[in-house]
Image (tube, rainbow, N blue to C red):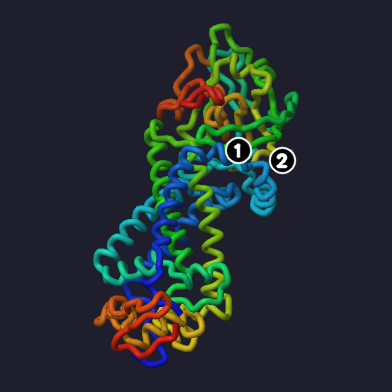
Amino acid sequence: MSPPDADARPYGRRTFLLLVAGGLSSLAWGSWASRILSPLTSGFTQLLADALPVGGWRIYTISGSMPEFDPRTWRLEIGGLVRRPVRLGYDELLALPRAEQVSTFHCVTGWTVHDVHWAGVRFPDLLSLADPLPEARAIRFVSMEQPYEDSLTLEQALLPDAMLAYELGGRPLSRPHGAPARVVIPEMYGYKGVKWLTRMELVADQPTGYWERLGYDQNAWVGRSNGHG
Amino acid sequence: MDTDRLTRFTRTERTLHWVHAAAFLVLLTTGLMLYVPSLSELVGRRTLLKDVHVYTAVAWVAALALVVAAGDRRAVRRTLREIDLFDADDRDWLLRHGNPQGRFNAGQKLNAILSAAFALLFAVTGFFLWLGERDTRFRLPNALLVHDWLTLASLTLFLGHLYLAVLHPKTRHALNGMTRGWVAEDWARAHHAKWVEQARRGGAPWAARAADSQAWTTCQPSTPSHFTCPGASPEKE
């Protein structure tokens, strides 16, 4: 038995300092390591996703609780600079031409979900119902979660992979994912995709949305905005 | 002190442990409710959860500082020193598990070191997550990633710690040390032989606090493998 001090080494503080240094520096190399390791860890992540319904998504809200969707009372209004203002019920929305896509979802805070299977309605099909006036240049999207709103130019909304989604992974959108309908635009960061949508307003000048008022970019192109790229 | 009981943790040490444990559990619970969508949906009250999470983190740092400031700082320093130092038996124990151990075995030392480092990194990344929401200049994309990794790592560590402290029949008596402060000498002899030896000699600082560190200073190496400790009974090497 050796006395405690004679051959003792201060490995404790060394380990601690190494861990802290490694952890702090990972703020710089974390996403790189995550990309390198993701083929190795995806099996584990899949296990976790099966065990817990995490699936890589993180849910952000700006108010006390998530809006609740009631199919009997929910309506989607399309108004503003249009010839025929429209109020669509849930069944009427589902009856419109259906589009499906598999796309990648990028959040501006650094996480990504691959192979997201959406189903919904393309914007041209929605807009043709209301018949926008020629001076309309952008769409203001208003959420049931007040005061969340954001906007897209018409050009952006008409991108071939932009849609108003009502299904995720083959099932109706769940409450955390924005039931009953949310905006999907894969080429932009997620904050442009207004959830719990209740109103689309055609406008001449693009308004400033919730996160844009807090300093985020109006044109949230993935990899080319908000300090990325 | 009762002959068959050994004081393992002072009140300050126990308070620190339970303050940390309580804060960890609240932060873990609210964190998972914010992070796992199905739990988020179940609970709903997101703003409230977020406030509880953030204010618990602030209270946790403040409470730890307060306990150290108002408590037995010498005991805390002594404990830090014990955790810092790994002797030859500790280093061997990590590989072979047989060597006699002091008040903390090498695994317990590692657990404490990892917990402390994780706590600091949680605090730093959490602070940047909070700040980044208020000022986009401080939004670090990887802060969230690192906060997640820390959750996984500390959850793993926590489950292992919980198993050894509550379930594993050989080790769970240790919980008594953290609740009532003492452990049975027979148990301690099997798990922390070197500590019992030092405590019985009466020179070990944690066994007789009045004679703080006497044993540390009086043992001198006489040959590389032998130590002479004046006033103490002959020791097994």
Q: Position of residue A109 (x, y in %)?
A: 50, 35
Does A193 sit above or below residue B236?
above
Q: In the picture provided, is B225 more to the left or to the right than A75?
A: left
Percent x, y for residue B203?
31, 83
Q: Secondary structure at mark 2?
A: strand
Q: Nearer the viewer, mark 1 or mark 2?
A: 1
Identity of the residue drawn at 69% across and 39% down:
A172
Q: Of callouts 1 and 2, which one flags the residue occurring earlier in the amino acid sequence?
A: 1
Whole-percent x, y for residue A56 in the image? 61, 43
Residue A171, labelled with which disc? Answer: 2
Q: CA distance from mark 1 to mark 2?
A: 29 Å
Residue that protrudes farthest toward the front in the picture: B223
Which structural element holds mark 1?
helix
Q: Amino acid at mark 1?
A: Arg
Residue A35 is labelled as: 1
Please identify the quarter of the rendering in which residue A202 is found: top right
Circles 1 and 2 on the same subunit = yes
| Rendering quarter of residue A104 | top right
Is the C-beta separation of discs 1 and 2 under 8 Å? no
Q: Quadrant of residue B67?
A: bottom left
